[in-house]
Image (cartoon, rainbow, N blue to C red):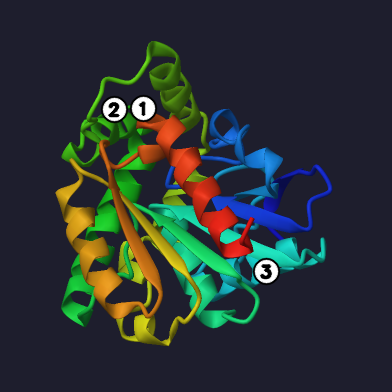
Amino acid sequence: MLNYKHITHNHSDVLVMIHGFLGNVHTFEPYISKLEAYVDIILVECPGHGEGNDFKATWDFPYISQALIETIAQFHYSNVYLYGYSMGGRIALYTAIHYRDYIHKLILESSTPGLETTDAQIARIKQDLQQSASMITDYAAFVKRWEQLPLFKTYHPLSHVAEVRQRNTRLNHEPLAVAKALIDYGTGKQPNLWPHLPELKLPVLLLTGSLDTKFCAIAKRMHTMLPSSTHTIIDAGHTIHVENSQIFDTIIVSFIKEENHD
């Protein structure tokens, strides 16, 4: 199983939330208070991002997906809503495709079905290997460069509290562990999931920020291929849940209630 935090109010349904790269089990804690009134919540922690990592295992997508299902299955919920942000969304999508009878509904924030050609995957693997080496050499410098990526441009400036919290979370990792995570299940190692999108019959909510043009384009294309999907664009960049948390939880609650006909 994966490391997790279980927040229960004895609901029959559960929202499982998977963080992005350099997040952890606490990433979503500031943004879920409204959600707790409607569902129980399981905050899961991806391999390499917390304690007790099995460095002998290969943290590939089948490994993580199976561990995720084992984590959820122990609680016997009626309906499982699976949410993933960025890297977590890639894991969530893979899991929904391979365990499609188990997941009731899928929410993807700023995520992708992966690279479509072998050449693109190989190029990304090389890039991820270089990044992992720089993480081990000087992790603080890596995090500083990471935070300056155009990807993380925000629609509104983050509050000082949110900015400090996010930076502390990113810095509080074991460099060898997150380097292995990048090598084992970075974008280059993700199977191409595009061909499987038409097979995914469950309702899917795609969330992207208006400034995040790359992922808006990806989600727009995904929307045309998924049989039952909604694409919502929010005034934000890549990290919608941080930048526009009130709209973020309102949209998720609406999506869940709509499905439950409440």
- Residue beneath disc 2: 144
| Mark 1–mark 3 distance (CA, rounded to whole Å) | 33 Å
Residue 127 image point, x, y percent = 23, 57
Which badge, 1 or 3, comes first in the chain's sequence?
3
- Residue beneath disc 1: 140
Q: Secondary structure at mark 1?
A: helix
Residue 21 image point, x, y percent = 42, 46
Identified by mark 3, the residue type is Ile
Determine whether, in the image, residue 111 is placed left or right of residue 68: left
Q: Are marks 2 and 1 in contact (CB under 8 Å)?
A: yes
Identified by mark 1, the residue type is Ala
Residue at the (37%, 60%) spot, across then down: 186
Count residues near mark 2 (Cα–Cα under 10 Å), then give few for <14, some for 14-19, many for 20+: few
Count residues near mark 3 (Cα–Cα under 10 Å), then give few for <14, some for 14-19, many for 20+: some
Query: Camera-side residue: 132 or 250?
Result: 250
- Residue beneath disc 3: 69
* For discs 3 and 2, the disc positioned in front in the rendered view: 3
Residue 214 image point, x, y percent = 17, 54
| Mark 3–mark 2 distance (CA, rounded to whole Å) | 34 Å
* For discs 1 and 3, the disc positioned in front in the rendered view: 3
Occupied quadrant, residue 119:
bottom left
Please tell me how many numbered marks the rendered image carries: 3
